[in-house]
Image: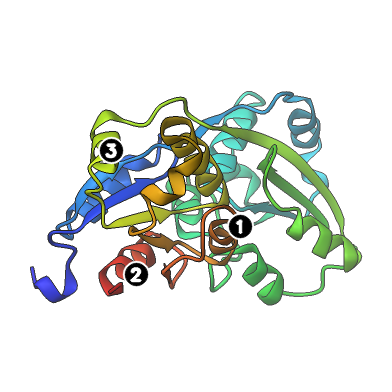
Amino acid sequence: MSKEFSLSGKKIILTRSQDQLSESHILFENKGADVYDLPSLIIGPPDDWGPVDDALGKIDIFDWIIFSSANGVVNIEDRLNQLDLSLSEVSKRIKISAVGRKTANLLNLIGAKISFVPPQFVADSLIQHFPGITQGLKFFIPRVQSGGRSLLAESFRSNGAEVVEVAAYESFCPDQIPEKTLDALKKKNIDILTFTSGKTVINTSTLLKKYFGEHWLDLIKDIKIVSIGPQTSLSCLKNIRKPDKEAKPYDLDGLVNACIEID
């Protein structure tokens, strides 16, 4: 492994949901990083499945289903299975769009046909490059219950589309920081802190304040911050400070490259 293109010797904290840490941990370790996990999201069900089930009960009225998260794919597929349906079957008659490589990979894995993936892995790119006219079309958009943006729904509605937007999952802040990561933070033995969503920024801030008190920002002032994309960068700016580097493309590979490129 060329040292120039690796993370050899870099001590990096990864903030992701608990069920996504393994993939990113392996990716960073394979580049030589010393990885410290900081699970900052727990994914669970929405408070009420009613709106999801109502939409799925009339799924054939929709022209498009828009997935912006793999979490939405998992829960919608599970609820469809309870109706003896699947996204693989549904996608034969309803178009599906996926924002993000992980979301698209999961849809491919379960055999669902994808009709459109935007060139950049953010909602703004989907809106900018969406194929065809949206006026009169019916969209089904599963999303996180709280904390996400309604940008897609608002944009499609403003262009004459009908949109059913439902909470398909919720995310929560964990209670603890793993001992290995906590110890490294106390010893100021971390080089880079990565963030993969606005909620990972907010929840990590909450956890750091819980453990280190009002002056928690002083603890990380010398740690480089790397964000996975524009919205995450805005959350960093609001809750911590402007990130030192932003990934491009806005995915895990881009995040790794941004960490490699950082001074």
Name the residue nearer the viewer: 188 or 175: 188
Q: Position of residue 92 (x, y in %)?
A: 63, 52
Whichever of labels 1 and 2 marks the residue nearer the N terminus, that label is 1
Q: Nearer the viewer, mark 1 or mark 2?
A: 1
Q: From the image, which quarter does the N terminus lie in? A: bottom left
Is residue 85 at least partly visible in the picture? no
Which amino acid type corresponds to the residue marked 2 in the rendered image?
Ala
Please state if 195 lies on the left or on the right of 63 as rendered: left
Q: Position of residue 236 (x, y in %)?
A: 53, 58
Q: CA distance from mark 1 to mark 2?
A: 21 Å
Contact flag, marks 3 and 2 (Cβ < 8 Å)? no
Whichever of labels 3 and 1 marks the residue nearer the N terminus, that label is 3
Please give the residue where the numbered disc 1 appears in the rendered image: 238
Name the residue nearer the viewer: 30 or 201: 201
Label 1: which secondary element? helix
Please give the residue where the numbered disc 3 appears in the rendered image: 181
Please give the residue where the numbered disc 2 appears in the rendered image: 258
Label 2: which secondary element? helix
Vertical comparison of 172 with 195: above or below: above
